[in-house]
């Protein structure tokens, strides 16, 4: 005997509505492999973090060529990004450092961290976002350094610049 089960609402043992999707939630963690190998950050320009490796990506949503994560399933996601910017060579120091999440090419949220006014050799910080997405939306992690007093040559640091995307179920 075969049949079809149709259900409008699934309830938890406590009688509360719950989500059951019958698949694993999407999860990806991408990073820059290697040492100080990340791309040069142009002064006063949002620069895409060249994340070139993944620790885990269960739906193959991250592309190491375009440096984008494409949302595999519509829903709510938690995004965590970390950037570590290192002064590579030359003189000068940046006054402000920024980390930003870009969705479908547009800035959604950014966080600023002020330099100390001295010669900042490295600046590291993180940002977090929870947001609803449509299937096919894409996420990019970018950084920006202000020109400051002659800032010339910052780059993303490998092993310390990363993006983690987690699908939240039942939210």
Image (cartoon, rainbow, N blue to C red):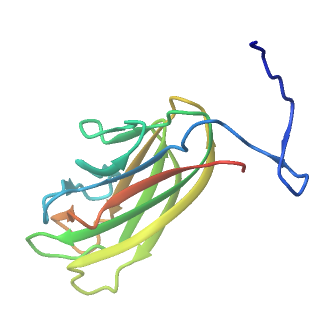
Viewer can see residue 51 = no
Residue at 31% in and 85% down: 117
Residue 63, relative to residue 123: is it above or below?
A: above
Residue that extends furthest to the right in the rendered view of this protein: 15
Residue nearest the viewer, comparing 43 with 53: 53
Residue at 8% in and 70% down: 89
Horizontal arrangement in the rendering, residue 167 relative to residue 4 (left or right): left
Residue at 18% in and 76% down: 92
Q: Quadrant of the N terminus?
A: top right
Horizontal arrangement in the rendering, residue 138 relative to residue 74 (left or right): left
Give residue 93's position: percent from left, percent from top: 23, 76
Tally of numbered tags: 0
Give residue 142's position: percent from left, percent from top: 36, 53
Give residue 111's position: percent from left, percent from top: 49, 66
The quadrant holding residue 132 is: top right
Residue that extends furthest to the left in the rendered view of this protein: 89
């Amino acid at each position: 005997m075969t049949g079809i089960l149709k259900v409008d609402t699934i309830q938890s043992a406590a009688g509360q509505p719950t989500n059951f999707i019958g698949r694993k939630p999407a999860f990806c963690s991408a990073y820059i492999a290697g040492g100080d190998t990340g791309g040069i950050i142009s002064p006063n320009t949002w620069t895409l973090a060249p994340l070139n490796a993944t620790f885990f990506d269960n739906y193959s949503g991250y592309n190491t060529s375009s440096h984008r994560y494409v949302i595999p399933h519509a829903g709510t996601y938690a995004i965590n990004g970390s950037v570590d910017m290192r002064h590579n060579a030359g003189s000068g120091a940046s006054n402000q450092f920024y980390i930003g999440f870009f969705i479908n090419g547009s800035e959604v949220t950014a966080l600023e961290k002020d330099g100390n006014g001295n010669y900042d050799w490295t600046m590291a910080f993180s940002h977090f976002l929870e947001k609803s997405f449509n299937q096919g939306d894409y996420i990019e992690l970018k950084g920006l350094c202000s020109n400051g007093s002659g800032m010339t040559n910052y780059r993303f640091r490998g092993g310390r610049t990363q993006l983690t995307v987690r699908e939240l179920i039942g939210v």
